[in-house]
Image (cartoon, rainbow, N blue to C red):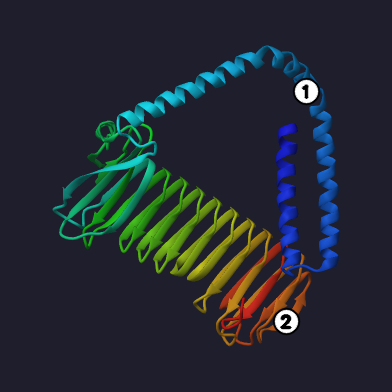
Amino acid sequence: MAVKDKLELERLLSILEDLERMYQNGEIREETYREMKKSYKSRITTLQDRIMDMEQPVAEAVDDAREALGQASAMMAQNVNDLLKNTMRLLKEQLKTAGIEGTARKYKADEVIRLPLEDLSHPFMVKCRVEKGTVSVVPGMGSEVVCTVEKAVKDMLGEELARKKLDRIDLSYSTYMHDTVRVMKLSPSGPPSTSVAITVAIPPGLSADYELVVEHGSVTMEHVAFGTATLKTENGSIEMRDCTGGQASLDTETGSITLERDAIEHCTLETENGNIKAVDARGLTFEARTEKGNITAYESYASSTLETELGSIKFRPDNDQHSCTLSSELGSIKIIVPDPTDPWHIRAYVERGAIRNDTPLERRMQGDNTILSSPAYRDGGIDISATTELGSIRICGINDEC
């Protein structure tokens, strides 16, 4: 129970910070701000009291144990500190004697893998899994896949030992057939403080499938065609530019996602903590979700879903046939209307906040929803549903500061 209460307390404190920011930016009325602040502060106080009540007996026991242990360990701690100081002093003297600086240097070594392809129309797949480093897919030349691996190590013990570490990096490269698909796979591993930067150059005319996973680092794809592409990171950014494909899934736990000038039939972007940006993207279905972060989407998909829990959404449809759902729990939503004479129908709902219309679209109420539409709308066109629990919704023109 204590763990759940602490997580809820952290969430409420984060909401309170965002509430203050929204009030300072004029996104919510003062009356709404004061009412919400009072409510959240009451809930925070209740949680803090409950956590204190549960932790008090534990704190008292810990204090007793700490006092008893403190006297016994004081002398030992002093001895350990003296020993560590002497060890570090001796190490620095040895490094200085050996002519090695006390700062880490970076050493690199390249390795190139070439895979000739006789038939570029044959199904092909690239699989990369990297613990620390980067993976990039770029256009190549000729009829072979060229994979360049830059191995790197950061070390302060001299070039000889660093080179030995570089030699211990195993690329785990293999090619094999899976059903009718030829697969090229790299799964590098190496000692601590090492990393790899993999660049895969794809020959013109080859439309491959991709599964690129990096634990700590970034993934990028540029100017290539694909059937399916799965790009994942735990801690790092994902970027896709000037690509065409059938289906793409871009997923990161902590990091930003960028999509620019891409034509992808079905695209899903997800991040737990980071911003999402899609500019000049087009296709059939588009989904973008983030727990903590902002979403910016200027796109021409037939159907879109944009969702964030803590963050803002900025949306501009670049086609006149579009169905879109915009949702934020805590944050503002801005909808840019390039041409108000197009067939527009916007259904906006704010639980606590304001709705502002700076365009010629006609405004009316329909139950709890605010409807903004153009005369050209006849059950077909640009259909948008925008909802935020706490924040503002603004509809503005393309030349407005929105």
Q: Name the side, left or right, on which 225 lies relative to 337.
A: left
Left or right placement of residue 321 versus residue 133 in this view = right
Three-letter amino acid code of the residue under disc 1: Val
Q: Disc 1 marks which residue?
A: 58
What secondary structure is marked by label 1? Answer: helix
The quadrant in which the N terminus is found is: top right
Looking at the picture, does residue 360 appear above or below residue 294?
below
| In the image: residue 378, left or right of residue 321 | right
| Residue 226 in which image quadrant | bottom left
Q: Quadrant of the C terminus?
A: bottom right
Q: Residue at x 83, y 67 (%)?
A: 30
- Neighbours of disc 1 within 10 Å: few (<14), some (14-19), many (20+): few
Determine crowd level at label 2: few under 14, some 14-19, many 20+ residues with C-alpha closer than 10 A: some
Give the percent coordinates (x, y) of residue 195: 35, 41
What is the x, y in percent for residue 23? Answer: 76, 65
The one of 23 and 211 positioned closer to us in this rendering: 23
Q: Which residue is at the far top?
A: 72
**Residue type for callout 2:** Arg
Label disc, if present, on residue 363 of the rendered structure: 2
Q: Is residue 1 visible?
A: no
The CA span between labels 2 and 1 is 59 Å
Which residue: 55% across, 82% down?
Answer: 338
Would you identify the image quadrant in which residue 60 lies?
Answer: top right
Question: What element does badge 2 sit on?
Answer: strand
> Decide: marks 2, 1 in contact (CB < 8 A)?
no
Query: Which x, y percent locates residue 173?
Result: 25, 39
Residue closest to the eye, 73 or 263: 73
Residue drawn at 28 percent across, 54 percent down? 208
Residue 27 point in image, percent of width and height? 73, 69
